[in-house]
Image (spheres, rainbow, N blue to C red):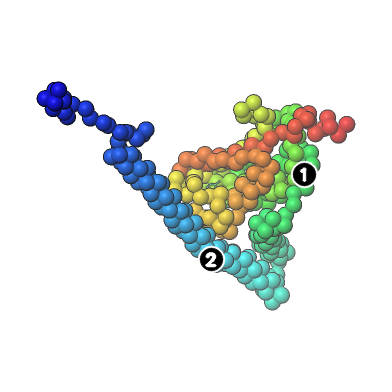
Amino acid sequence: MRSMMRGTEGQWRLIVNHRSGSLEAVLASTRRRNLAISFGILFVLAAGVAMIVVATRRAQRFARLQMEFVAGISHELLTPVAVICSAAENLVDSVVETPQEINHYGAVIEKEGQRLTDMIQQTLVFAAVQSRRKRFDFNLVDIAEVIRNAMESCEPVVREADVDVALQIDLGLSAVMGDQTALTQCVRNLIANAVKYGRDGKWIGINVRKASVKRSDFVEITVADRGRGIPPPDLPHIFEPFYRGREVMESRIHGAGLGLSLVKEIVEDHSGKVSVKSTLSRGSVFTVLLPVASSGGTPQERRT
Ligand code: ADP
């Protein structure tokens, strides 16, 4: 018996296992989990640092653009003031004698005065929009009327640049719920830019039609020119406040870099969208989409 017991000795082995596997496996999985958590925390920290760097860069860039804006706007304001002062001086000193010369000087003063007024107005609207002091006055708006008003206020610059304007407005457009003055300013800025940067093409096209995007109805306004176009590196930035294309600054084309940022601000406050397509030396097309007022119908129908 003894010898039998001795023969079976060592044949039994008691293995005790934790439910989640061997001790080594448990330790390894705990280590893996800790490692994953550590990497997760590291990733969150790295993302935080990256966001701080991006935000700081953006703030620095904005501060630089603001400084350039102050320098630029001061120069822009001084130029028409200098022209007005020298024209007035010539009139006072009787250097100008003939009625034609007086007319010419009067026209110069009027033009530069208008340029000054436009710039101050745009800066004030921009400041008001930025500080959220500007409250839009929403009403049913007839976009055809907005285009007519914008065209009317741009008439002097269009005439001076001697560009052809091709205007097409579809009949029976639905009304838009919006602020008529702000929308007029928006279209005005686009037309003024088309004239300013597209004057070499001698043509601007304004088109207003119905559009449907993802089963929603919009009024689509396009303002096109056949001018210099926008260099690809400028395209992502042109709607930012104070941004001005490098080439247009080098060409000494006047401006404060606020026009398009106002357009974007106003359009987005109307739940719309603004976009641009541009080809160098061929021209640019700016498109504004504004949602039609929800109950449909034309403004004329509503008024009756
Ligand atoms: P500003 O005209 O005072 O410079 P904007 O905000 O209106 O400011 O325009 C920003 C920039 O976008 C301009 O400096 C110019 O480089 C570019 N841009 C705008 N409209 C046009 C256009 N129709 N054709 C070419 N470039 C344009």
**Which mark identifies residue 29?**
none
- Tell me the crowding category of disc 2: few under 14, some 14 to 19, or many 20 or more residues within 10 angstroms, Cα based: few
Task: Verify CB contact (< 8 Å) between mark 2 and mark 1.
Answer: no
For residue 36, which quarter of the picture?
Answer: top left
* Residue at the image point whose x is 79% and y is 42% from the top: 139
Q: Quadrant of the N terminus?
A: top left
Residue 142 higher or lower than 121, as above or below: above
Residue 87 higher or lower than 137, as above or below: below
Asked if residue 271 shows in the view, the reply is yes
The secondary structure type at the circle numbered 2 is helix
* Residue at the image point whose x is 69% and y is 49% from the top: 185
Residue 237 higher or lower than 288, as above or below: below
State the residue lying farthest toward the bottom: 93
For residue 77, which quarter of the picture?
Answer: bottom right
In the foreground, 39 or 247: 39
Where is residue 279 shown, x and y percent of the image?
47, 40
- Tell me the crowding category of disc 1: few under 14, some 14 to 19, or many 20 or more residues within 10 angstroms, Cα based: few
Where is residue 97 shown, x and y percent of the image?
70, 70
Amino acid carrying label 1: it is Phe
The secondary structure type at the circle numbered 1 is loop
| Total marks in image | 2
For residue 188, side relative to residue 275 (left or right): right
For residue 65, side relative to residue 20 (left or right): right
Amino acid carrying label 2: it is Met
In the foreground, 189 or 297: 297
User: Upstream in the sequence, badge 2 or badge 1?
Assistant: 2
Which residue is tagged 1? 138
State the residue lying farthest toward the front: 1
Q: Quadrant of the C terminus?
A: top right
Where is residue 259 shown, x and y percent of the image?
61, 52
Which residue is tagged 2? 67
